[in-house]
Image: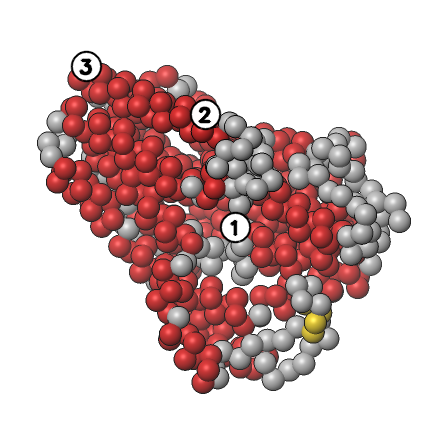
Amino acid sequence: MLSRMLNSIERVGNKLPDPAVIFLLGMLLIWGLSAIFSQMSFATIDPRTGMALEVNNLLTGSALVSFLSSMVTTFTSFAPLGVVLVAMLGVGVAEHSGFINTALKLMLKVTPAKLLTPSIILIAIVSHTATDAGYVLVIPLAGVIFFAMGRHPLAGIAAAFAGVSGGFGANFVPSGLDPLLQSFTQSAAQIIDPAISVNPLNNWFFTSASSLFIVLLGWYITDKIIEPRLQQTQVDGDTSGLPSFDEVGTKEKRAFLVSTLVMALGLALLYFASAPSDSPLRAANGELTDFKAPLMQSIVPLIFLLFWIPGAIYGFMVGTFTSSRDMIAAMSKSMGGMAYYIVMAFFCAMFVAAFTKSNLGALMAIEGAEVLKALALPSSVTIVGIIFLTAFVNLFVGSSSAKWGLLGPIFVPMLMQLNISPDLTQAAYRIGDSSSNIITPLMPYFPLVVVYCQKYVKNTGIGTLIALMLPYSVTFLIGWTLFLLGYWALGIPLGLQASYSYGL
């Protein structure tokens, strides 16, 4: 029954227009709705300004002129575009030189086949520490690894996508996301209590425990639901050049050893450069994991260098590169594979910009929170409501910080008045913010994952990916919510200096 339902979702979803066209139609719809709602007055207070929220009409003459004059910069400043292209330039050299293929062959020889799925999901979860690295490295490599192991590559991509994006709120390694969310939570809490202080790692214990929980859920879903269903999906893409289980020659082993030592040396230099308290790689407050820290802002260029340099060394040592032209050709070939994504990114950037400027997303989020507040439900039910409302809003507003900037000033003070701590409210938000990431085509990296799948199954569309990810999304949303309620009932600490209740 589940397989039939997912097949139906896939068929319906694949009849939708191309993702680029969906973004274009979405932008036009936002324009129309902005013109309608801009004529209405709302009593809704925008927590960012403290004033009544207004919907901006995007069909006025000045708005259309602004759209045209800023179109180029809107596209070129679209964050996922630069992240993907710069990282792929370095990865392309490492891939086409054979460095990545050799690394995968050697890794697969020492990785137990039964532990491949949980290993992929765990690595995907940890990749959050390096901002968007999981999207451009872990997800495509998971497809390659599964294919090399004789398993369906789309199952590997799905498992990694579930860990990177569906398990975004789970990680046992602190990252820049923790102080980012904490800053919004503390500001919101100080609306009620100006003296309150929230620890940046107030959810660390919970997110650490959630990592194991998400790995177990993702492991079961991948091996028992997703991969059996994919047995009827034929791999018909261009898989030439992907690694196989043939032996790694002496020359390749020697080149790989040298290249890996160079990569290790680069990481060691990075460590010693960032270790001093006055390192220029640290933020003004001395933190390395702060989003404003130069180290965090340099993650993508570092990915480029840490793959480009070892890849080039490997290529020249084994002979896949004989001149600099071969290396540039590898980078060009890598960019050629990104052509479809670049087109989709253009229309996605236009849609996101329109949705942001219109204020329709803010209106939807705030009104939904006000409805939840008016229901005056019991504490546990309210927490569940916050999780599900956040998951729904997440289908339309992808940015985690943008959503929390809107919802935090409403959720946190509201629940403090119900004796629920800001720490628990933030933990609930993280669950909802993660679970529906993997089923919304409006998530900026969703089209990129479609492109990854098309490398193996040519006719992969939006419906294919949604059908693949829906079991993860629903299971994560329900299972993770129950996990939080059980965690709460047992009274296990959420994190450092964290509590469940707030005493007025």
**Residue shown at 60%/56% (left/top)?**
403
306 to 475, vertically: above or below: above
Q: Is residue 5 visible?
A: no
Q: Secondary structure at mark 2?
A: helix
**Residue shown at 40%/65% (left/top)?**
74
> Outermost residue toward the right?
504
Q: Which residue is mark 2?
A: 272
* Near-viewer residue (106 or 440): 106
- Looking at the image, residue 311 sits to the left or right of residue 352; the answer is left
Q: Which residue is mark 3?
A: 250
Identify residue type, mark 2: Phe
Check disc 1: other Cα within 10 Å, few if <14, some if 14-19, many if 20+: many
State how many labels appear: 3
Identify residue type, mark 1: Asn
Disc number at residue 472? none
Q: Which residue is mark 1?
A: 437
Identify residue type, mark 3: Thr
- Looking at the image, residue 248 sits to the left or right of residue 154; the answer is left
Callout 1–callout 2 Cβ contact below 8 Å: no
Q: Is residue 62 visible?
A: yes
